[in-house]
Amino acid sequence: ASFSGTPPSYAYDADRAEEQRRHHDMMPYIDDSPSSSPHLSSKSRGSRDTLSSGSLESTKSSEPDLEKGLEMRKWVLSGILASEETYLSHLEALLLPMKPLKAAATTSQPVLTSQQIETIFFKVPELYEIHKEFYDGLLPRVQQWSHQQRVGDLFQKLASQLGVYRAFVDNYEVAMETAEKCCQANAQFAEISENLKARSTKESKDQTTKNSLETLLYKPVDRVTRSTLVLHDLLKHTPVSHPDHPLLQDALRISQNFLSSINEEITPRRQSMTVKKGEHRQLLKDSFMVELVEGARKLRHVFLFTDLFLCAKLKKQIGGKSQQYDCKWYIPLTDLSFQMVDESEAVPNIPLVPDEELDAMKIKISQIKNDIQREKRANKGSKVIERLKKKLSEQESLLLLMSPNMAFRVHNRNGKSYTFLISSDYERAEWRENIREQQKKCFKSFSLTSVELQMLTNSCVKLQTVHNIPLTINKEDDESPGLYGFLNVIVHSATGFKQSSNLYCTLEVDSFGYFVNKAKTRVYRDTTEPNWNEEFEIELEGSQTLRILCYEKCYNKTKLTKEDGESTDRIMGKGQIQLDPQVLQDKDWQRTVISMNGVEVKLSVKFTSREFSLKRMPSRKQTGVFGVKIAIVTKRERSKVPYIVRQCVEEIERRGMEEVGIYRVSGVATDIQALKAAFDVNNKDVSVMMSEMDVNAIAGTLKLYFRELPEPLFTDELYPNFAEGIALSDPVAKESCMLNLLLSLPEPNLVTFLFLLDHLKRVAERESVNKMSLHNLATVFGPTLLRPSEKDSKIPANPTQPITMTDSWSLEVMSQVQVLLYFLQLETIPTPDSKRQSILFSTEV
């Protein structure tokens, strides 16, 4: 029968794999031979079995079947031809730029060196020759088709030349790396390598399709892994009595031996290659994260794909703009768990970076930002600004690396654990949810070969959604720098819980590019509709988002699942709102509802920008305690230390020393106002009121008292000197200056300060429980005790930008923190005799 008409495309292209499968379903004589599995190693099957695999025993088959089988043979061969034609066009496309590149290499302006060309296009010309010869031999035989037509010798010869592929595969990774480097170094080559034209073999001959170098270089790897498939299908439709049978059998044996020898290096499961088409694996989420590796913090970029979790590291960029990743490890989602496999495994110790260091970084960042703004105003050259921006980026990356300390752990099925550090429970919960959701759709475990892994890691560059470390440096100038000031938040109530439980909320805001927990409501017991009605005042440092998390408090420790090696309360819901300067401008309370998977939380928010929140009011009233000069109060009370300060300190020492975040966590605003009113009218029941109140409200009242003093405890007069003194670099000079300044404070101020100082030191002694270090306390109290009245403050009285603040502000706050920290860290404060008596007396008041 002459060969006429176009046969159905029985191709081996990955693109047409689907068609191929459909075609398989219609084919006669399909047995369960491993024709669909390219992973054929001669070891895995008995050799006899392999030899007769799928062949037709002529004795058993009736004549019409045989006819049909030979008819199929023609279709199979024409499919092979079509597939070869496509493959040749891909190799041609690779060879096309080779000649001009080689020619240019000998000139004075080479695009690539001869060595680079040799490496990238290694063995491609040879492969082209081999397959061209095979194709040219096969085409006329298929065109003059008869059932006796023989093709076995061509396949046998092709199989004997597979050695060239061994060389290609061995060189493949080097070729890819070289190509990547050359693209980075040479824009012209980058342009060429993205636009390689391959002839389209379908319909019209003049159509061309664009391919990248990366895609084309993978084609031979792809082709060699399919060489046994081709032979299997052909053998299946070649009767044993046919003269081709022994030849094809021989070709199959050679191919199988060859493949099993390189199977370790390339797995023919080509799924990772189809990433680009999105057929199998897609990127769901990626972000920068800090990994804890043998006690050291490392910045990583993690990628969650539809079937695996990959942890990569950004390689140092050499020349060019193109990024590159190095894969550190990956876990198929079916093998990933959050539970510890081995309970006895020790949870790695998280190395905490002292707050002082983090603060020093923040100070540096604020200073550099200040410098950048100054340079911009002075219209200095961009070189200076570029240099500053580079410094800023380094500092911010460092801060990002050092600040998180909440563990997020994943384990693979062999029990190996990996620990990340995250600064926000919100993000940790989000990652867990995304992974668990996707795990429901994954059923098989697998492993990637080095080549596949390389391909996948290369694809990350194109797929990533988070391009920059979340730093302010990456924000455009016109982007909102976020809000600076105080955000008052009332957490009213929540509805939508299915069953009654013990519920509480926490609030997180972003500052310096990452999120931190700022406040926590009390636990509302046994309810489906908690009514917290608690107000918090949260300080914002360049914040753009407020997040709320709702938890169920777990009192029963045994029921808890151990995640990340710590017992955790369960997150019931989480949500967030953007803090929009435009909306918050008008200083009124704004109600809002945050919906989170079925639960609704009602909030009110009000924003006060820094300039307004920090004004000290001149003392107009002579009665009461709040907003009255400290000297007037102590004189009236005939005390050394105001009654309110002693009462609050006493109550906190009685029951607040182990409260986590004491002085940092906001108390309920209504409680604080009630206490303030009681102290102001000198209510006799104030101590009873205090004993029934949440201890955070008492801490809040004490802070409010100092904040509302018409003049700071360290006085307006001396404030500038303290700020200068702390900046001295000679430690001896610094100490004498700071102590002299301290001792020149008016007596009530000095005595009250020393009384408070002793108390704060005692709070910090319980740091292991209450998590309040000297530094944390200095951060909370520094601005409160030192913040000057308006005339000395560097804050503009009527700022041009009402909400965003200049960075000189944060520098001022930092210096206030440093001053207080200095006194907190001094072992003893020597005081002259005249004052020692009164001090001793005062602390026993």
Image (spheres, rainbow, N blue to C red):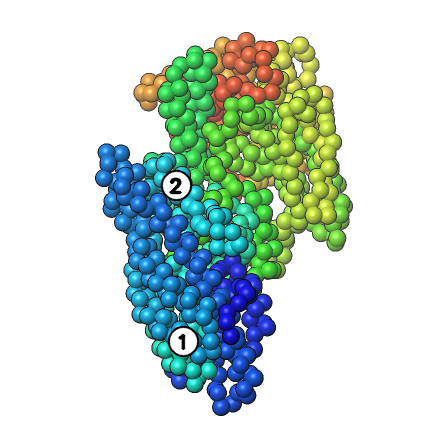
Circle 1 residues within 10 Å: few <14, some 14–19, many ≥20: some
Q: Is residue 385 above or below residue 433?
A: above
Asked if residue 48 lies left or right of residue 566, the reply is left
**What residue do we see at 43% from left, 85% from top?**
241
Closer to us: mark 2 or mark 1? 1
Quarter of the rendering containing residue 532:
top right
Closest to the observer, 118 or 799: 118
**What residue do we see at 38% from left, 27% from top?**
391
Amino acid at dot 2: Ile
Q: Is residue 654 above or below residue 212?
A: above
**What residue do we see at 34% from left, 68% from top?**
158
SS at badge 2: helix
Residue 123 location (% of width, % of height): 30, 56
| Location of mark 2 (residue) | 192
| Location of mark 1 (residue) | 150
Closest to the observer, 11 or 665: 11
Asked if residue 42 lies left or right of residue 687, the reply is left
Which residue sits furthest bottom?
Answer: 59
Residue 390 location (% of width, % of height): 39, 28
Residue 752 location (% of width, % of height): 53, 21
**How many discs mark residues in the rendered view?**
2
